[in-house]
Image: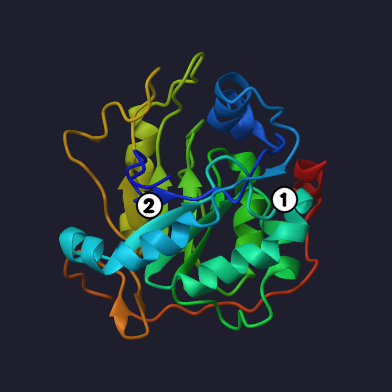
Amino acid sequence: MENSKINWTDHTWNPWIGCRHVSAECDHCYADAMVTNRMGRDFGTVQRTKTWKEPPKWNRKAPQLEAELGRRVRVFCASLTDFFIQDADEWRGEAWDVIRECAQMDWLILTKRPQLIARRLPADWGDGWPHVWLGTTCGARGSYPRLDALREIPAAVRFISAEPLLEPLVDINLSGFHWLIAGGESGSGFRPMREEWAIELRDVCARAGVGFHFKQHSAFRPGQHPDLCGKVYHEPPLVTIGRMPRVEEPISLSGSVVVAKSEPDKMSDSLKAMER
């Protein structure tokens, strides 16, 4: 979708739709509700979409939009599925081709299955493509093993989506990460997020030198109350990559980021349980 309403991206691309619940963060999945109720499809069946010609169009227009935004254009992939779900293995190579060719934009790939990434990267991934960010969902302490799994994957930017934020994460280890998105759950039966949980994450990010983006408080409608203590926090990743600083305003960097190499097939018992 061009011009997404999600306030941490500009566009969203779903090369396929459909997924399966794997953890507590999935219990009130907005994507499940949208695909099931609005589209009338079985969310548990992963299906290829007809949207593959859209990203090249956005890529051609990206320089103009970048000039308007004052930063590079962002594409969230994917909002109605998991990019690394096994059911999409036959199409993922083509999706990587699209992402490779659309390098005028930054691609934000968010997954709840980071243990599957290593064996599903393109052959020329190396230390990571400079325009691709890899992220994982962690809105509860039970998902901490996902962070360990993603640290093992080389990437220009690694990020965490702590949404829905379901409990305090004050002891979260942000080593190896550059950006954190926090937010409350929306939709029918949303689980309330306490403001102090988001404040704690803001402060943990500040101490760790990690960019903090607060999306929203818990509410029936998405995008409600995007401020925290009366202030909007839309910080970018606090990291400089190659010649292009991924920042929207001057930021003092204290040092370089060491990117770990991947170890294929390394999966904790906790992550195996999530995937079952």
The residue drawn where x is 63% and y is 83% is: 124
> Any mark on residue 204, and which?
2
Of 140 and 41, nearer the camera is 41
Which residue lies most toward the top here?
A: 189
The spot of residue 70 in percent (x, y) is 18, 64
Question: Type of residue at label 2?
Answer: Val
Local SS, label 2: helix
Q: Earlier in the sequence, mark 1 or mark 2?
A: 1
The spot of residue 66 in percent (x, y) is 24, 64
Left or right: 178 in relation to 249: right
Left or right: 264 in relation to 204: right
Local SS, label 1: loop
The residue drawn where x is 69% and y is 31% is: 43
Circle 2 residues within 10 Å: few <14, some 14–19, many ≥20: some
The reply to whether residue 186 is in sight is yes
- Viewer-nearest of labels 1 and 2? 1
Question: Type of residue at label 1?
Answer: Ile
Q: Are marks 1 and 2 in contact (CB under 8 Å)?
A: no
The spot of residue 147 in percent (x, y) is 59, 56
Q: Is residue 33 above or below residue 148?
A: above
The residue drawn where x is 26% and y is 67% is: 247
> Any mark on residue 85, and which?
1
Screen quadrant of the C terminus: top right
